[in-house]
C-alpha cells in the first residue's frame, strides 16, 4: 500500500508540474465577472487531469501486482477495480471538458455524473442496503431498487458538492484527503485492504496536486478534480457500507456532512430567493468566511492581498471538517450517535452562517 501511494503521489506531483509549465500560455481564462472568482491572473484549472493520471496508472499497477503475486499481494486489487475506474470516467471526463472549454452546462454534467452512477450500479452492483432505521430497512429489503436509487443520488450529487466547496486554495483537496483517510482507516478495521488502498492512493495523489495548489495557487483542480474526489468517495462509501454490516451507513454521511449540507442549504437559499439552483453565486459559507472573517491582511499589491486571504480561508474550513470527521471515526459503528452529530452539525452550520451574515463574528476568529 505504501509503494502504491508513493507512486500516486509522485505521478500527480510530476504531472501537475508539467501541466503548470505547459499551460502557462494556455490557461483557460475564468471570466472576470464570474461571482465565484477569488483570484487574480489566469491559472490553469485542469489539475484534476494530474490526479486522474496518477490514479489510473497507480491502480493499474496495483492490479498487475495482484495478478502476478496472487494471494501473496497485500493489495488484493482484483478486476472489480478496473470496473471502478471505467465507471468513474464519464463524470470525470465531463468535468475536464468543462475545465477546458467552459461550455458544458450544469445539466449535461449532472447527466454525466448520473451516468457514472448507473455504471457503478451496473458494474459494481452498488446499492445502499440499509439505513439502520426501523421501518426504512424493511422497505429497502422489500424494494431493493430503492437502495440503488439512493446510491445513484449519492453518486450523482457528491461530485457537485465537492465542486461547490472547491473555492479556495487547498480547501476541497484537503477535505478529500481527510475523508479518504478516515474511510481507509475504517476499511482497514474491517479487513478491506483493496478499498483502503484505493482511498489512501487517492489521498496521496491529491497531496501531490496540492503541492502546486496550496498555498500559492499555481494550479486549480477544476470540475475534473472535484468530480474525481466526489465519485471515488461516493463509490468507496457505498462499497464499505454494502460489504461490511459493522459499518453504519451514517458513518460516511457524517464524514461528508459539510459538502452535502453546503449543497442542500445552497439549493434551499437559492429557491427561496427565486434563483435557479444551478446559478453560481458568492454566498457559500466559505465565501462568507473569506469576506467577513479573513479580512485582516494588508499588502500594497491587490493580487497578493487576495491570494493571502484566499490561503487563510481554507484552514477555517479544514477545522470545520475535522469537527465531524473525528466523531465519525470514533463512533463508526454507532448509528444513534452518528445521527446526533449530523443534526448537531446542521444546527451549528445554520447558526454560524446567520452569525456571519449579520456580522456577529467573535473577534478572536478574526485574528
Image: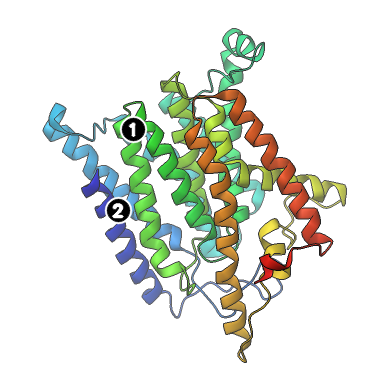
Q: Report, in whole angstroms, how far the alpha carbon at label 2 lies from the one at label 1.
A: 19 Å
Residue drawn at x 51%, y 52% is 175
Q: Which residue in the protein does label 1 denote?
A: 188
- Residue 283, percent from left and from top: 75, 60
Q: Which residue in the protein does label 2 denote?
A: 8
| Closest to the observer, 47 or 294 | 294
Residue drawn at x 67%, y 78% is 296
Residue drawn at x 57%, y 31% is 152
On the question of residue 114 being in view, the answer is no
Q: Residue furthest front?
A: 364
- Residue 192, percent from left and from top: 33, 29
The image shows residue 173, relative to residue 168, as above or below, that is above
Label 1 residue SS: helix
**Which image quarter is the C terminus in?**
bottom right
- Colour mode? rainbow
| Closest to the observer, 330 or 55 | 330
On the question of residue 186 being in view, the answer is yes
Q: Which mark is residue 74?
A: none
The image shows residue 256, relative to residue 69, as above or below, that is below
- Residue 235, percent from left and from top: 46, 35
| Closest to the observer, 195 or 182 | 182
Label 2 residue SS: helix
Dot 2 crowding, Cα within 10 Å, few <14, some 14–19, many 20+: many
Amino acid at each position: 500500500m505504501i509503494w502504491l501511494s508513493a507512486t500516486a503521489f509522485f505521478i500527480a506531483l510530476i504531472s501537475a508540474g508539467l501541466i503548470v509549465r505547459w499551460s502557462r500560455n494556455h490557461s483557460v481564462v475564468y471570466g472576470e465577472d464570474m461571482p465565484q472568482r477569488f483570484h487574480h491572473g489566469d491559472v490553469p484549472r485542469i489539475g484534476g487531469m494530474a490526479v486522474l493520471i496518477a490514479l489510473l496508472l497507480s491502480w493499474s499497477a496495483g492490479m498487475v501486482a495482484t495478478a502476478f503475486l496472487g494471494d501473496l499481494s497485500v493489495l488484493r486489487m482484483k478486476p472489480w477495480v478496473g470496473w471502478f475506474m471505467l465507471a468513474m470516467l464519464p463524470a470525470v471526463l465531463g468535468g475536464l471538458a468543462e475545465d477546458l472549454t467552459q461550455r458544458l452546462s450544469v445539466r449535461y454534467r449532472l447527466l454525466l455524473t448520473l451516468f457514472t452512477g448507473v455504471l457503478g450500479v451496473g458494474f459494481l452492483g452498488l446499492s445502499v442496503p440499509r439505513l439502520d432505521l426501523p421501518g426504512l430497512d424493511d422497505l429497502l429489503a422489500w424494494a431493493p431498487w430503492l437502495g440503488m436509487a439512493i446510491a445513484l443520488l449519492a453518486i450523482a450529487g457528491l461530485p457537485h458538492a465537492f465542486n461547490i466547496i472547491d473555492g479556495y486554495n487547498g480547501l476541497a483537496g484537503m477535505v478529500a484527503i481527510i475523508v479518504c483517510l478516515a474511510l481507509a482507516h475504517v476499511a482497514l478495521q474491517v479487513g478491506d485492504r483493496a478499498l483502503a488502498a484505493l482511498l489512501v492512493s487517492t489521498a496521496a495523489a491529491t497531496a501531490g496536486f496540492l503541492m502546486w495548489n496550496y498555498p500559492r495557487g499555481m494550479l486549480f483542480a477544476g470540475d475534473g478534480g472535484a468530480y474525481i474526489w466526489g465519485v471515488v468517495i461516493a463509490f468507496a462509501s457505498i462499497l464499505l457500507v454494502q460489504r461490511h454490516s459493522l459499518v453504519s451507513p451514517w458513518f460516511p454521511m457524517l464524514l461528508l456532512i459539510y459538502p452535502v449540507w453546503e449543497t442542500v442549504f445552497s439549493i434551499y437559499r437559492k429557491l427561496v430567493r427565486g434563483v435557479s439552483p444551478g446559478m453560481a453565486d458568492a454566498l457559500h459559507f466559505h465565501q462568507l468566511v473569506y469576506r467577513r472573517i479573513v479580512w485582516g491582511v494588508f499588502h500594497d499589491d491587490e493580487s497578493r492581498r487576495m491570494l493571502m486571504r484566499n490561503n487563510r480561508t481554507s484552514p477555517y474550513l479544514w477545522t470545520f471538517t475535522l469537527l465531524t470527521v473525528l466523531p465519525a471515526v470514533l463512533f463508526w459503528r454507532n448509528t444513534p450517535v452518528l445521527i446526533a452529530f449530523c443534526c448537531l452539525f446542521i444546527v451549528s452550520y445554520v447558526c454560524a452562517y446567520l452569525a456571519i451574515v449579520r456580522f456577529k463574528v467573535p473577534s478572536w476568529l478574526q485574528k
